[in-house]
Image (tube, rainbow, N blue to C red):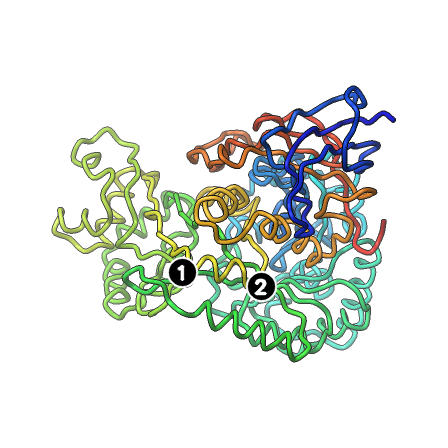
Amino acid sequence: MKYDIVIRGGTVIDGRRTPRYCADIGIRDGVVASVGRIAVGEGDQEIQADGLIVAPGVVDLHTHYDSQVFWDPWCTISGWHGVTSVVVGNCGFGFAPVRQEQRVRAMQTMARNEAVPLECMEEGMPWDWETYPEFLDSIARTPKGVNVMAFVGINPLLVWVMGSVEEAKSRPMTVPERHEVERLLKEAMTAGACGWSAQLLGRGSIQRDHDGTPMITDLMAETDLVFLAEALGRIGTGGIQMIGDIQSADLLASHSGRPVIYNVLAPTTDQHGAPAQSYKKVIEWLANTNARGNRIVAQAVTCSINYEFTLEDWNLFDSSALWRDLTMGTIAERAEKMRDPIRRLALHEEWASGKAPLAGGGTQEREERLGVSLLDLLLAYVTVDDPEIRRWEGHTVAEIAQGLSCHPIDAFLDISLASNLSAGWQSKPRDIDPTVMKEIATAPYAVPGLSDGGAHTKFLTTGSYPTEFLATWVRDHKVMQLEEAHWRLSAYTAQVAGLNDRGTIEIGKPADIVVYDLEELALLPTERAFDWPAGAWRRIQKAIGWRWTIVNGEITFVDGQCTGATPGELVRHGQK
C-alpha cells in the first residue's frame, strides 16, 4: 500500500495525552492513513524521524492575520513555529462586512490598535468582498500555507448596520438595527464563522482607534452586549472571544449559553518584579464559573513579552491621554509635541501622581503589573553618529536619567528626539517564576498562547510562543510532560475554537503534523525583515529545531525554510 509521505521511526505524541510511542505514520491524500509499522519503500517521500518528536501541528487560537494572509500564505511568524492552523477575527476587529466606501476606515481601525501598517493593507488586500460570506470565500480561494478559521468581529458588524464608526460609538442600537445584526450574524455563522469577538476594555482602553478614541466595542451599551450574546444563543452554535474583565465574561457566557474564550490569564509581578497573586484569582474564578455552568476557557500568556520599539510606531501608552496625544500625528508633529515644555510639565505631573503608563498596560501606581515601567526600558540603539548619544546604548532610562541629571521622561524623549524618534527601546527580559508558569500553564480551564500573530508587528514577536513553550517551559523547566503540552497546544485549543477535526494524529484526520528535535529547539534573535507590501518592515523571530511542518499532508517547511506549498484550507465552522 503506497503513501504520499511516510514519517518513519519518530516518537509520536499524538495530542490525545496518550503515552508516547515509536511508530511510522503514513499519509495519503492529505490525511493520516496508517499509524504503526510501514514497510520500507511504501512512501513516495520518506521522512527519517529517528530521535525526533512527531506531534500534531499547533493551533494558534488568537491571531490578527485577517489582512496578512492575503500576502503571506504561511502567516508568519506563526508558520515558522510549528503552527498549522490559525484563528482570525479576534478582539472584535476585522474586515467584513465592509462596504466599498468604508474600506479605508476599516483599515484605519487596525493601523493603530493592532499596529498593522496602513500602506501594507492598502497594497496587499484584494478587497473582492463586501459581505462576511464573500470575505470567507475570498480567504478560501487565496493560496494558504496554514488552515484558517474566523470569528466575526463586532466592530465591522455594527458599522455596517449603524452606518458609520462614529454613529456606532455614539449610541445603542435601535430595535430594527438589532434585528439586522442578528440576521447578519446568522448569515456569517451559516457561512462558517466560529462565533463573534469583542474587545471590552472601556473608555480607558489601551488599544485604540486611529484617532485615539476607544474602539466601538469598548463603548458598547451593556444591553447591546447582552443582546449579541442572546442572539448567538438563539443561533445555537459557535462561541465568543473577548478581552476584558471577568464580569463581562460571566455575563456573555450566562446570556449566550455558548463557550467563551477569555483573554487573558497572565503571570503578573509587583513593582519589584516578584510574582503577584492575581493569576490565582483568575484560576479560582475559572473553576467557580465553570462549576456554575458557564463554559469559559482562558488563554494563558505562556511566553515572555518583550517589547522592542521606537516612538515612530509605539501605541502601548495609549491608556494615558497625555502620551496618546504625544504619539499621534506625523513624525514631525509628534516631535514638536514632545519638545513642548507645557506638555512635558503635564507628563511630569502625571508621573508624580503615580499615573504614568506602563508599556503594555496599567500605571505606575498599580501593585500588580503585566506592563513594563518606563524606568526599566533599555536603549538598544540610536540612529545618529553622536558619541554623546551613542554612549547610552545598553543603559536603562533610569540610568540615562541619572547620568544626565534629568527627569526619566526627559531622558526618554530627548534621546528619542536626537534620533528623529527612531531610537530603539526594549523591555528588559522579565524573569518568570517557573512555579507560577506551571500553575498558569496547567490550569484546567486554560490553553497556551497568546500569539497576537499579525499584530503589533513593529514591537512584538509573541507569535513564537510554541517554541518558547516547548523549549523553555516544558523541556528546561518541566512544567508538564510533552503529552500534556501537545494536547494543550493542539487538541484542547482546537476544541476550544471548534476546529473539531484538527489537533490530534489519528487515522482519517487531516495530516497537520510537526516533526522536531526537542533538544535543538530554540528561538533565534529578533530581527527586522523588509518583506511586507509597500516596502514596510516588521519585527520577526525565527527558530531552530523545527525539522518538518506538514499541513493537510504537504510539507510547508523544512528546517525553517519554506517549500512554497500552499495546502492550507479555510475551515468553515460546523462544516466539513
The mark that comes first in sequence, 1 or 2, is 2
**486 or 186: nearer the viewer:** 486
Residue type of the residue flagged with mark 1: Leu
Q: Residue at x 83, y 60 (%)?
A: 187
Q: Which residue is identified by label 2?
A: 298
Q: Is residue 116 visible?
A: no
In this picture, residue 214 sits left or right of residue 241: left
Identify the residue position indicated by label 1 in the image: 370
Rendering coords of residue 530 (x, y %): 50, 29
Task: Provide residue 452's location: percent of width, then percent of height.
Answer: 55, 50
Q: Is residue 464 above or below residue 343?
A: above
**Dot label at residue 397:** none
Image quarter of residue 348: bottom left
Classify mark 2: residues with Cα within 10 Å, few (<14), some (14-19) or many (20+). many
The residues tagged by marks 1 and 2 sit, at their Cα atoms, a distance apart of 16 Å
Instruction: Examine the rendering and report whether any part of residue 262 can be seen.
Output: yes
Above or below residue 354? Residue 395 is above
Furthest-right residue in this view:
1
The residue positioned 74% from the left and 34% from the top of the image is 25
